[in-house]
Image (cartoon, grey):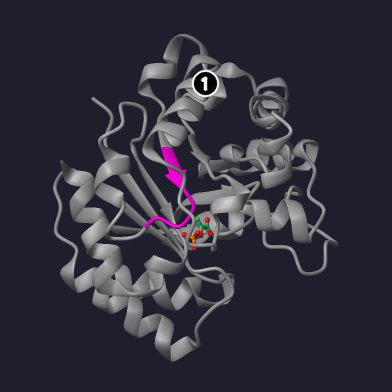
């Protein structure tokens, strides 16, 4: 039985004050024995939000991590630093990192390895663009993104990670993948994960909200969600967490 996981990706939003208020509203009202919940605030707010989330059951997570361990890498935040601030998870390969910052699969794989080396649980994001889907290349794209990490880290490493399928065309657009579309790709991903595949948590991300989450969570291979916009509203995010319980 896989334990559901709901992760909120706040992206580059909020102020110091609004972030603390949002974290507190989530922490005070999150009650679940059976669902894991994490939020990914901007890195500068990690320290303060760690305190706001303390003993709430809501984990801290990061949106990105350096591929390097330490040293002269201006602007980067290391895996050791994230672990020091009690981050449990870190996103790697989010489509916005791939598209806006030119992160190729080899770099994503290096980040995955570095994060795991410091005890963080990587949430590997994979997904196709609309053009790739229309060209019939969805499975090819997903396989390339996944295999880059399997080649670098080994299949065994994936069994203690999380994989999120996030079709790029669904992120921030309001156009959620149908439950069947999401299930098809997540089943494909699970089939590539080897003998421990059944234990790996797979998430769907892309315009998940309180209205569409229940249908997605009914799918066999969807073990939770990576939520962007809807995670910026405490009540809606908490509703998605509650829906994951079933
Ligand atoms: C995301 O940022 O990973 C995401 C899925 O965003 P949204 O829920 O807003 O589509």
Front-most of 69 and 95? 95
Front-most of 128 and 226? 128
Considering every residue shown, the one lying at the far front of the view is: 134
Considering every residue shown, the one lying at the far bottom of the view is: 17
- Indicate left or right for 35 with 44 as reference: left
Front-most of 173 and 199? 173
Considering every residue shown, the one lying at the far top of the view is: 195
Q: Quadrant of residue 3?
A: top left
Residue 28: x percent and y percent? 18, 73
**Which residue is depicted at the point 27% across and 68% down?**
236
Quarter of the figure that contains the C terminus: top left
Whether residue 158 is visible here, answered yes or no, is yes
Whether residue 4 is visible here, answered yes or no, is no
**Which residue is depicted at the point 15% across and 52% down?**
32
Q: Does the residue labelled 1 lie within 8 Å of ligand 1?
A: no
Magenta-drawn segment: 203-208
Depicted 75 relative to depicted 211: above or below = below
Magenta stretch contains residue 128: no
Q: Mark 1 points at which residue?
A: 188
- Indicate left or right for 2 with 11 as reference: left
Q: In which quarter of the image is residue 237?
A: bottom left
**Which residue is depicted at the point 27% across and 60% down?**
210
Residue 163: x percent and y percent? 50, 36
Disc 1 crowd, CA 10 A, few/some/many (<14, 14-19, 20+): some
Quarter of the figure that contains the N terminus: top left
Q: Quadrant of residue 229?
A: bottom left
**Which residue is depicted at the point 63% across and 19% down?**
154
- Asked which secondary structure carries label 1, the reply is helix
Depicted 212 relative to depicted 197: above or below = below
- Indicate left or right for 226 with 44 as reference: left
Residue 103: x percent and y percent? 78, 49
């Amino acid at each position: 039985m896989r334990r559901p996981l709901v992760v909120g990706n706040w992206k580059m939003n909020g102020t110091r004050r609004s972030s603390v208020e949002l974290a507190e509203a989530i922490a005070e009202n999150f009650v679940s024995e059976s669902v894991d919940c994490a939020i990914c605030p901007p890195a500068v707010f990690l320290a303060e939000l760690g305190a706001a989330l303390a003993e709430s059951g809501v984990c801290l997570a990061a949106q990105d991590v350096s591929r390097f361990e330490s040293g002269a890498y201006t602007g980067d935040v290391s895996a050791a630093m994230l672990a020091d601030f009690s981050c449990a998870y870190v996103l790697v390969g989010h489509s916005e990192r791939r598209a806006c910052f030119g992160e190729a699969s080899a770099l994503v794989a290096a980040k995955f390895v570095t994060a795991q080396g410091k005890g963080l649980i990587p949430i590997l994001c994979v997904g196709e663009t609309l053009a790739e889907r229309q060209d019939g290349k969805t499975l090819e794209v997903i396989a390339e993104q996944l295999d880059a990490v399997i080649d670098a880290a080994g299949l065994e490493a994936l069994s203690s990670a999380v994989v999120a399928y996030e079709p790029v065309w669904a992120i921030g657009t309001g156009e959620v993948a149908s439950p069947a579309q999401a299930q098809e790709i997540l089943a494909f991903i699970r089939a590539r994960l080897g003998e421990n595949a059944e234990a790996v948590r797979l998430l769907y991300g892309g315009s998940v909200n309180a209205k569409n989450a229940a249908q997605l969570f009914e799918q066999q291979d969807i073990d939770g969600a990576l939520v962007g916009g809807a995670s910026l509203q405490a009540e809606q995010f908490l509703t998605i967490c509650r829906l994951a319980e079933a």
